[in-house]
Image (cartoon, rainbow, N blue to C red):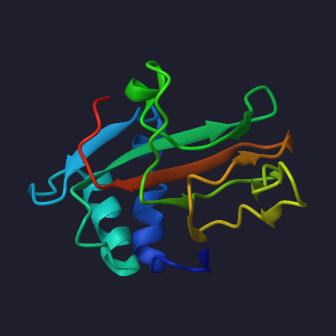
């Protein structure tokens, strides 16, 4: 796992947090590795994975946003190819990444990783913090007591997934 605070420059973080980018939220979107990156979140995913060191075996990535509050939770899960999961086949991405957006008065909403057997690793949702982690390991978001948690997420894959 890699955790980096103040990942984006102040100017890039302000652009990342523009209300228009978060208004509707984004459902999972696929981007081929070699296609031109014309949309903001395509560019952001590509930038994150290039910083991390995208493996040669990666053919592309998916991205989405999560906007969670105390009424909406994200329980224990692994990131997986959802189309194959419907056929009872579990295939997971090469790696996962979350980037925390701006939030006010957030209490709770920690990323917890690997807690089904041992104590989970707990990562606080600090604005402009990026977390690269093995998304095949069970993880969840702890209960949110107050506020809204905004997260941009992306996974890299070694085959094109169907969304």
Q: Position of residue 119 (x, y in %)?
A: 90, 61
Residue 42, placed above or below residue 19:
below
Residue 148, placed above or below residue 38:
above
Q: Position of residue 29 (x, y in %)?
A: 31, 38
Looking at the figure, which quarter contains the N terminus? bottom right
Residue 155, placed above or below residue 88:
below
- The quarter of the displayed image where residue 53 is located: bottom left
Q: Position of residue 83 (x, y in %)?
A: 38, 25
- The quarter of the displayed image where residue 6 is located: bottom right
Q: Is residue 70 left or right of residue 119?
A: left
- The quarter of the displayed image where residue 48 is located: bottom left
Q: Is residue 131 left or right of residue 33?
A: right
Residue at 38% across, 47% down: 63
Residue nearest the observer in this picture, 31 or 138: 138
Looking at the figure, which quarter contains the C terminus? top left
Residue at 73% across, 28% down: 72
Residue nearest the observer in this picture, 15 or 112: 112
Q: Is residue 102 left or right of residue 109?
A: left
Residue at 23% across, 72% down: 56
Residue at 9% across, 55% down: 35
């Amino acid at each position: 796992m890699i955790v980096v605070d103040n990942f984006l420059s102040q100017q890039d973080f302000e652009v990342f947090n523009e209300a228009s980018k978060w208004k509707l939220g984004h459902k999972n979107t696929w981007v081929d590795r070699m296609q031109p990156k014309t949309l903001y979140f395509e560019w952001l995913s590509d930038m994150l994975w290039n910083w991390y060191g995208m493996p040669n075996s990666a053919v592309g990535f998916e991205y989405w946003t999560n906007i969670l509050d105390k009424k909406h939770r994200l329980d224990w899960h692994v990131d997986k190819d959802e189309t194959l999961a419907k056929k009872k086949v579990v295939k997971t991405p090469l790696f996962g990444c979350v980037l925390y957006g701006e939030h006010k008065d957030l209490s709770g909403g920690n990323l917890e990783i690997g807690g089904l057997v041992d104590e989970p690793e707990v990562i606080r949702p600090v604005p402009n913090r990026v977390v690269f982690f093995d998304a095949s390991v069970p993880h969840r978001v702890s209960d949110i007591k107050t506020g809204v948690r905004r997260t941009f997420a992306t996974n890299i894959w070694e085959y094109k997934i169907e969304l």
